[in-house]
Amino acid sequence: MVRNVAGVVADLDPEDVHLLSGVEQGMRFSEWVDRERLPDFADMPAEEVDYRLDRCERRELVERRTIQYEGFTLTDRGYDVLALHTFAERDTVEGVGAPLGVGKESDVLEVSSYRPLALKFHREGYTEFRQVDRERDYTSDHNHVSWLYTARKAAEREYEVLRALYPDVSVPQPIDQNRHAVVMAKLDGVELAQATLEPDQAAGVLDLILREAAVTYEAGYVHADLSEYNVFVAEEGVTVFDWPQAVPTDHDNAHELLVRDVSNAASYFTRKFPGEVDDVDAERVARAIEDGTFESVRTA
Ligand SMILES: Nc1ncnc2c1ncn2[C@@H]1O[C@H](COP(=O)(O)OP(=O)(O)OP(=O)(O)O)[C@@H](O)[C@H]1O
Ligand SMILES: [Mg+2]
């Protein structure tokens, strides 16, 4: 679900953002931060903490739970606000626009800057956190892995891979990263799954995609989630996006993942354009990519 965080950020005082960072600090130690410790974490008098918590709770930026103690935690929206605030301070983002897509584990929004960009908020770990047994002992989670950590790691990973691949591989240009968020170029075109291709274009588009897989491999990575949902098609060609799960080519499963990528990409075309695209021997194509001899599915 995409919510409009832009209005929320504009409506906040600097002290509200300061309190949110205090809650974030506390969440390094426990998912639910003891209210008593917030004046320390936020470096704010207790009365100010109370006032700010109230404002942030009303805006659904923090959530309160009283079990063994009164605890507060950031909501996904609260964490979004912190990242967005940082991007605004760095002049990466000026305004927030319409949703571009909702993935299984992300929200992607259009943002404005000197040109239209896309902002991807990673949500890995958040859904599981929401489902955690409400009765568990909240005082004993010293070694917890917070969803903040999981989502931030995914964003860092995606940004790192985009930086390694751009511009040799056709990927969205990486612009900035903070916390669980990545800012990148906004893609023109449509997802392959929604693209209306002429049957005689099918084999050519599949070739373009596999060529990107080959250049990606040369650059040291395997996408590991290649499908018709993670490729954009436009007049100018194809762009491969959604990279947090990519693995380096020396990863133990790199070969199997490459075979699966090739097989997923090819099977979309053989299903949709039977007659036009011959069955692809994914194992053989993957070997050709690994050897640096991939030219075309028609020759592989
Ligand atoms: N740079 C971009 N420009 C335009 N739209 C984008 C961009 N990045 C992502 N999108 C849109 O947002 C959707 C979700 O993005 P992405 O696939 O990266 O997220 P995800 O949560 O990892 O997806 P999945 O459901 O595959 O796990 C995409 O399907 C696409 O429509
Ligand atoms: Mg995706």
Image (spheres, rainbow, N blue to C red):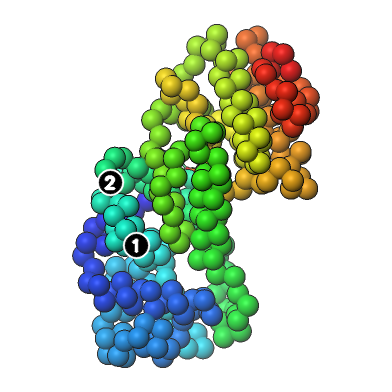
Q: Position of residue 152 (x, y in %)?
A: 51, 61
**72 with respect to 206 (left or right):** left
Identity, as a three-letter code, of the amino acid under mark 1: Thr
Q: Which mark is residue 113?
A: 2
Q: Is disc 1's CB within 8 Å of ligand 1? A: no
Q: Residue at x 22, y 61 (%)?
A: 10
- Compute the Cα span from label 2 to label 1: 14 Å
Residue 263 figure quarter: top right
**243 with respect to 77 (left or right):** right
Q: Position of residue 288 (x, y in %)?
A: 75, 25
> Badges 2 and 1: C-beta atoms under 8 Å apart?
no
Disc 1 packing (10 Å; few <14; some 14–19; many ≥20): some
Q: Residue at x 65, y 13 (%)?
A: 277
Looking at the image, can residue 209 be seen? Answer: yes
Check the image and report above or below for 236 versus 260: above
Secondary structure under tag 2 reads: loop
Disc 2 packing (10 Å; few <14; some 14–19; many ≥20): few
Q: Residue at x 56, y 53 (%)?
A: 157
Q: Name the quarter where the C terminus is drawn.
A: top right
Q: Position of residue 182 (x, y in %)?
A: 44, 51
Q: Which mark is residue 222?
A: none
Looking at the image, can residue 77 be seen? Answer: no
Disc 2 or 1, which lies upstream in sequence?
1
Identity, as a three-letter code, of the amino acid under mark 2: Ser
- Residue bearing mark 1: 86
Q: Position of residue 109 (x, y in %)?
A: 36, 46
Secondary structure under tag 1 reads: helix
